Each structure stands twice: as structure tokens, then as C-alpha cells.
Amino acid sequence: MKQKKYFILAAMLLIASMTFGSCAPTTPAVVPTTPAVAPTTPAVVPPTAVEAKTVTLAIEHFSVIAGTTWSGAQDRAGKRIAEKYPNVTYIFRENVGPDQSVPFAEEMIAQGANIVIGNAEFMGLPLIDIADKYPDVYFASVIASDLTTKPNFIRFFPRQYQALYLEGLIAGALTQTGNIGIVSAFPCVQVIRRQAGFILGVQEAAALLGKDIKVYVKYSGDWYLPQEERDIAATLVDTYNVDVLTQQTDSGSTLDVAKEKGVWFVGKDMDTVGEYGWSDTKTVAVSFDTRWEVIFEKIVQDYMAGNKTPETVLYPGMETTMTLADGTVVPTIDLMNDGKTGIDAISPTALPLIPDQIIQLVKQRREQMMKGEWDPFTEHALVSNGTGLAMEGLPIPAAGTVVKPAGQAPTVEWLLSKFNFDLQGTTILK
């Protein structure tokens, strides 16, 4: 009898253990796997609000902000960084000359600024003089042609020529008179390089479409001279029969002339239709937008990480992106017009005038550049026009000189500091 009770008790215990065991979560077996290969450039994860340093990002704008594409885009960039990072405050000074760079910087450092940016080289370079005095502050400046750096003095520029090349393809397809005009600031490496990107696109479109296209460049003498820019734009249309205008200056005067005279305008630096409401897509065939915040984020992240040896020459292109506070992913530069990007940025009025061959090429090249697989300055030969800017120890190459052969990638140093000649086929007006 006792033995039977033992059997019953054992059976009850077995049933209980099975019942409770069925409610327990299953623990999967651990299977050995081959460790994943780490990416060569790991993504930088922004610090949490608890971990993050408090950062005051100070930008010294060389011009006024309102009504300009260059400073306007950089002001927007500072605001976008502050929107994304709750520990970042953005402050600024505008219309800053080179003699004001250092005193304004020290004034903002006293207010807590630990990153100070000069948004043009001529007034940003003086910041190097106080870099050693403030070793815990990052200083940064746009590159025009000088590549001087220090561990805490960073130089930067976006590869705007990539978007300008795409614009050149579109402009070359649009012109009916075969004359395209550029209202430009003054000869310098930065300007010559950007114009070259545009001109390569124009010349490629001309070759594909069997057109004879002339590109005229006339200099105003400075970046922001609204009346001089207006006069040059009017001369290009009235005297040289230009029917597509673009600019390497910063006021809206060239766009105003394009609208008044009924010719196409190709924009730069910012989507002026979408951002400022300047004109509309009946005049603006396409523009490109520069997202300086992609560069500024890299600088801010390095500072927050306590990096004492940040990368000191930054030259990102369309392959480099940033995620904005609202989740939008933006490349450093892209075609943009009336809030639309890529092929959609081409004016709906201009689109039917552009052969599908060019539309598809713009689409293809944009995608390739966003993947880092193609670049106009690598693909094309760079042949001197015999005009440009003679620099110390670097004369202008003679007309017809193949300075860089097709298929060879130029170095970052050469592009940023030694590209001192106009491309063959450019007409520089006096």
C-alpha cells in the first residue's frame, strides 16, 4: 500500500513539473558563428543627452545672411545642427571682415563658443592665429586655395563641382542660341574649379547633342556686388545673346535679370525657389543645394567625442550624407529646385525641352556619384584654356596643355589648391 502511494506521489510530481515547464520561455541553443567583419568606417553614433558635451557652434558669416545663398545656406546648416542635437547651441555674427574675425571669435568664446567657423577663407584664415591660445576650441574655415591646418584648425569645402557638372548637362541641353553666361566673382581656385565642373557638363551635352556651345565668363570683382552682377548679366544677354545664365556670386541680381529678360537661370548653393521664394520654375531651370550641415555635423561629433586629432581637411561629395532631425537623409550636395531633388528638381517647364538622352545621363551620373563610383574630374581630361590665375610658383598652363588626362583621379590637394586654369573653350570677357 505504501508502495502504491509512492507511485501516485511520483506521478503527481511528474505531471506538475511538466505543467510548469510548458510555461517557461524556451532558451535557444547557442550556435557558434563566424564574427561579422566590422565596416572600415564605423558609423558615428551621437552621444546621448546624458553623455554629450554642451557645444556652442559659432559661425562667422562674411556677408549678410538674408538674401544670400552662401551665408543663407550656412546659417540654415547651423540651425539644423541645433535642431538635431539638444546639447548644441548655434550663435553667429554676419558681415564679418578679416580684421573682425579674431575679436568676434574671442567674444563668442567668452560666451561659451567651443567651435568657431569662418565661412570664407579670407576672413576665416585669421582664426589660426588664436588656435594655440584656445587648445580646447575647434576652429574651422572654408578653403579657397590655402590648405593650412593645425590640430584644432580644420579646413573644409563640399564637392559642389559634382552638382555643377549635372547642371552643365542640363544647361547645355536647354540653350537654343548656343550661348551660356556665367556672372562670376573673381579668378581664384575655388571659383575656377566650380566653373570647370559646370563647363564639363555643358561640353559633354554639346558633344552628345551635336551643338556648338560657347560659355562666357565675366567677373564682377567680388562675391556680393548686386548692381555690378546685374549689369554683367544684362550685358551677357543683350550683347552675347546668352539664353542660359548662371552665377558664381552671391546676390539675387542675376536671377532677377534672367526673369526680366525671359532666359533660363541655373542656380547655385541653395534652392532659392523653395527656400526664399525667389522667382519660380518658369525661370529657374534647376539649382543645387549645399548641405553644409553634413560637414558641420562631422566637426561637432568629433568635438563631442573629445577627439584631439580630428580630420583637418574635409572635402565630402554626394556620397556623404546626414540624417536631419526630422529623419530626412541629405547628401552634402544635390540638385534641388522648388523643394524637389534629383531629376524632379528640373523645372516642369524646362523638362520637355531636354532630350531624354540627357535626362537619363543626369539620373545615371547622379546615382553613380552618390555611390562614390564616378566623378567628372576623374572621367574627363582637364585641358587648359591658357587663362586663369597665375599663382606663386604655379603659372597658368599654356593653352592646349593636358594638365590631367582622362581616367586619372586628381588629388584632393591639387583640386583644392592648384586648379588655377580655365578649361579649354571658355571665353573670359574683360
Image: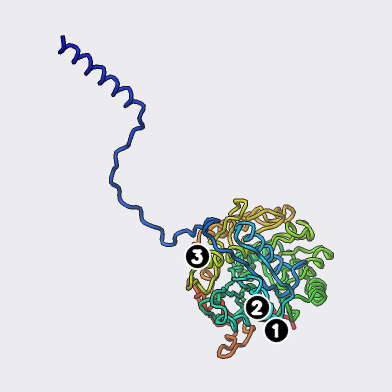
Residue where numbered disc 3 is placed: 305
Marked residue nearer the N-terminal end (1 or 3):
1
Any part of residue 288 in sight: no
Mark 2 or 1, nearer chain start: 1
Q: Quadrant of residue 140?
A: bottom right
Between circles 2 and 1, the one closer to the viewer is 2
- Count residues near mark 2 (Cα–Cα under 10 Å), then give few for <14, some for 14-19, many for 20+: some
Q: Which residue is depicted at the point 80% across and 71% down?
A: 237
User: How far from the left and from the top, in percent, is residue 72?
Assistant: 71, 66
For the point 35% across and 30% down, which residue is it?
24
The foreground one among 91 and 197 is 91
From this view, report whether residue 358 is shown above or below residue 69: above
Q: CA distance from mark 2 to mark 1?
A: 13 Å
Helix, strand or loop at label 1? It is loop
Measured as percent of width and height from the top left, residue 275 is found at 73, 58
Q: Residue furthest right?
A: 260
Question: Mark 3: which amino acid?
Answer: Ala
Quadrant of the frame with the C terminus:
bottom right
Q: Could you tell me which secondary element the residue under label 3 belongs to?
A: loop
Name the kind of residue labelled 1 in the image. Asp
Mark 1 or 3: the one toward you: 3
Residues at marks 2 and 1 touching, judged by CB atoms closer than 8 Å: no
Mark 3: few, some, or many residues within 10 Å (few <14, many ≥20)? Answer: some
Q: Position of residue 146 (x, y in %)?
A: 58, 81
